[in-house]
């Protein structure tokens, strides 16, 4: 189960394993974005910080491809939803029902836009940024592996 922890960005010390697959001594780090501010499409004001999380080459490659595929897959889902709504309603439903069915994916898309990067990071990197502190020094992170999160906090392997 994922666990939320808070680290000081300049002092963050992660276990020397890939955050995603636990391979020892990974050669890379992945810069996990952690943000604060507003992103409401028309109004956008954000401060973005980065926390370097250890990652192996295979997981880094998966994250790169996952990031590239996420938006097209999301748009495909929305397009499929609209096609399904059109096919199901087939002009026989009242216009209001049709409008609601077709607008259904819009709120989902807005939420997904905010959550997509975090979801991709959590599942493909093993860590996702939740929030940057007001003084930009601390990052709240979600860590997929519980033991990894505990070791990050204590600096010692979990017994
Ligand atoms: Zn890995």
Image: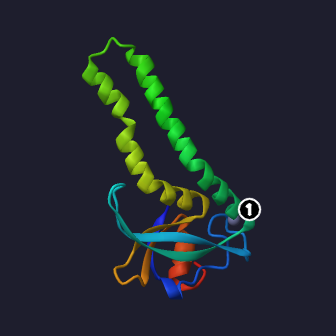
Q: Position of residue 50 (x, y in %)?
A: 52, 75
Residue shown at the point (44%, 77%) measured from the top left: 139
Mark 1 beta carbon near ligand 1 (under 8 Å): yes
Is 127 placed above or below 69 here?
below
| Quadrant in the rendering for residue 131 | bottom left
Name above or below for residue 147 compared with residue 83.
below
Q: Position of residue 136 (x, y in %)?
A: 40, 82
Q: Is residue 43 above or below residue 149?
A: above
Q: Position of residue 112 (x, y in %)?
A: 43, 49
Farthest residue, direction bottom: 11
The quadrant of the image that shows the C terminus is bottom right
Left or right position of 10 against 114: right
Tell which of 152 and 137 is nearer to you.
137
Tally of numbered discs:
1
Q: Does dot 1 land on a helix, a strand or a loop?
A: helix
The residue at 61%/80% (across/down) is 157
Farthest residue to the top: give it: 92
Badge 1: how crowded within 10 Å, few (<14), some, or many (20+)?
A: few
- Residue 127 figure quarter: bottom right
Image coordinates of residue 104 in percent, x first then y, are: 35, 34
Q: How is the image coloured?
A: rainbow
Whereabouts is ligand 1, in terms of quadrant?
bottom right
**Residue of label 1:** 58
């Amino acid at each position: 189960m994922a666990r939320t922890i808070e680290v000081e960005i300049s002092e963050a010390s992660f276990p020397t394993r890939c955050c995603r697959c636990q391979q020892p001594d990974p050669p890379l780090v992945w810069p996990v974005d952690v943000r604060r501010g507003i992103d409401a499409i028309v109004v956008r004001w954000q401060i973005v910080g980065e926390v370097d999380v250890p990652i192996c080459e295979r997981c880094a490659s998966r994250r790169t491809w996952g990031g590239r595929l996420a938006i097209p897959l999301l748009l495909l889902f929305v397009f499929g939803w609209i096609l399904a709504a059109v096919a199901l309603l087939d002009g026989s439903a009242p216009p209001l029902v049709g409008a609601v069915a077709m607008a259904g994916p819009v709120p989902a898309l807005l939420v997904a836009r905010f959550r997509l990067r975090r979801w991709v990071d959590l599942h493909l990197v093993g860590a996702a940024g939740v929030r940057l502190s007001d003084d930009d020094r601390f990052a709240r992170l979600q860590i997929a592996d519980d033991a990894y999160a505990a070791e990050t906090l204590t600096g010692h392997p979990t017994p």
